Amino acid sequence: MGAAIFRELARMAAALAEIQGLRSFTLPYPGFAQRALDRTVMHCLNVGERPPKSLPELWEWCRSRPAEDPLFAIPASLVTPGTTLVHRVGRMPTRSCLEVASHGPDGGVEAHARMLLAELGARCGTGERYRQCRRFLARHPVVHQRDRFGSGWDRAVWSRVKYLYGPLPESLLVDGTFLRCPSCGLPALSWDGTVPIPGQPATYSDLWCEGEDCLRDQSPNLIREPDQAWILQRSLRTFLALPYRTEEAALDALDHAGIDHEALPGALSVYRLRGTGPGIVDIQVYERLQPALLAASFTDSASLADRTLVVVPARLAKRDGYREAFTNALPAALRDRLALTTPGDLMPDLGGAR
């Protein structure tokens, strides 16, 4: 029951954060949020825990109570200890929150990203148009009015993808200014609600960005005219734009080795390789903080190639226990067909797959 509540709270947090102009939670609460609050209250009463009195208090619980809290009792083999659904500094849903919200048969937030890309593909009509649009989305999670007058701006591409963008939500503004992480290009927030001094690097303790583990050697970019900017939907920012640098690095490695590849339709970052010997070989690119949840998403062996290399950034693969958690969470029938790798190790591991 605790695990079910944890996942429902993850989906609640992800959905609430998308509500435009959300500064505080006022009655009447959205139906999905009221249901999550009611079920949490009932669960608390059943286990003898003091229940939250309101949605603001429940949001604070998502910020302060980690996955291993007795209320949820999520095992460390599934979600990393210390993981919260709302970031302690940014007070916005964490990346892990969206990964938890995507865990399950319906795919949650990640499935929403796939649906949006499928709709875009249908609108584009041709594979080349779709590739151009997908590349634009991945490289432009935030678009400013002045970008449209810069060199290289493609009006045709923008006309096809602009419906996937919306105004900057009030919840992502700091004193009327939008902060953009210089590393990942995603939204950032300061813990004290003030605009950082330009040119002064921020630390992990005083700045949050949606990428969460980006370098803090530069100050965030400031957009002081937020009404002249548009932001990509969160599901695409997390599951398309965030892993795109890893995807480009992996494809560059394949191109350098002269290995042809073809993007598979209906997937986020899946490529089928050609000329790799007998058997079908795919690569799938991800940027996930929770390796066990990533492994648990591979449940249908019929949809997999003979061999699949799961590519993640090197900084994640090097984390203590990351590879082991991924391997241990794989269904036993798939462990011989799936292998975790990085862009730098892709070619040696591909040689082993051959």
Image (tube, rainbow, N blue to C red):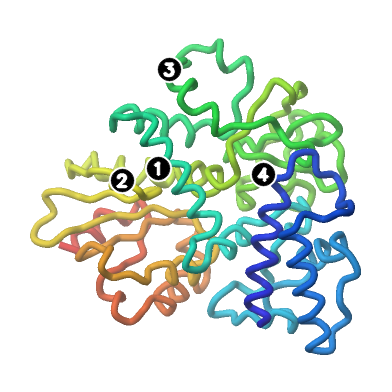
According to the picture, the residue beneath numbered tag 4 turns out to be 216
Q: Classify residue 60 as left or right of residue 146.
A: right
According to the picture, the residue beneath numbered tag 1 turns out to be 118
Sequence-wise, which precedes: disc 2 or disc 4? 4
Percent position (x, y) of residue 344?
Answer: 35, 52
Query: Mark 3 Cα within 10 Å, few/some/many (few <14, many 20+)?
Result: few
Q: Classify residue 8 as left or right of residue 50.
A: left
Give the mark toward the camera: 1 or 4.
1
Percent position (x, y) of residue 240?
Answer: 48, 44
Residue 265's disc number: 2
Judging from the image, what secondary structure is the residue with disc 1 in?
Answer: helix
Q: Give the amino acid type for the residue marked by disc 4 in the picture.
A: Arg
Q: Give the amino acid type for the residue marked by disc 1 in the picture.
A: Ala
Judging from the image, what secondary structure is the residue with disc 2 in?
Answer: loop
Q: Give the amino acid type for the residue marked by disc 3 in the picture.
A: Ala
Sequence-wise, which precedes: disc 1 or disc 3? 1
According to the picture, the residue beneath numbered tag 3 turns out to be 156
Residue at the spot x=70%, y=60% of the render?
A: 12
Sequence-wise, which precedes: disc 3 or disc 2? 3
Residue at the spot x=73%, y=57% of the render?
A: 87
Q: How far apart are marks 2 and 1 (CA)?
A: 8 Å
Q: Classify residue 298 as left or right of residue 106.
A: left
Q: Distance between the residues labelled 3 and 2?
A: 22 Å
Percent position (x, y) of residue 130?
Answer: 35, 32
Q: Considering the image in quadrants, where does the C terminus appear?
A: bottom left
Sequence-wise, which precedes: disc 2 or disc 1? 1
Q: Distance between the residues labelled 1 and 4?
A: 35 Å
Query: Mark 1 Cα within 10 Å, few/some/many (few <14, many 20+)?
Result: some
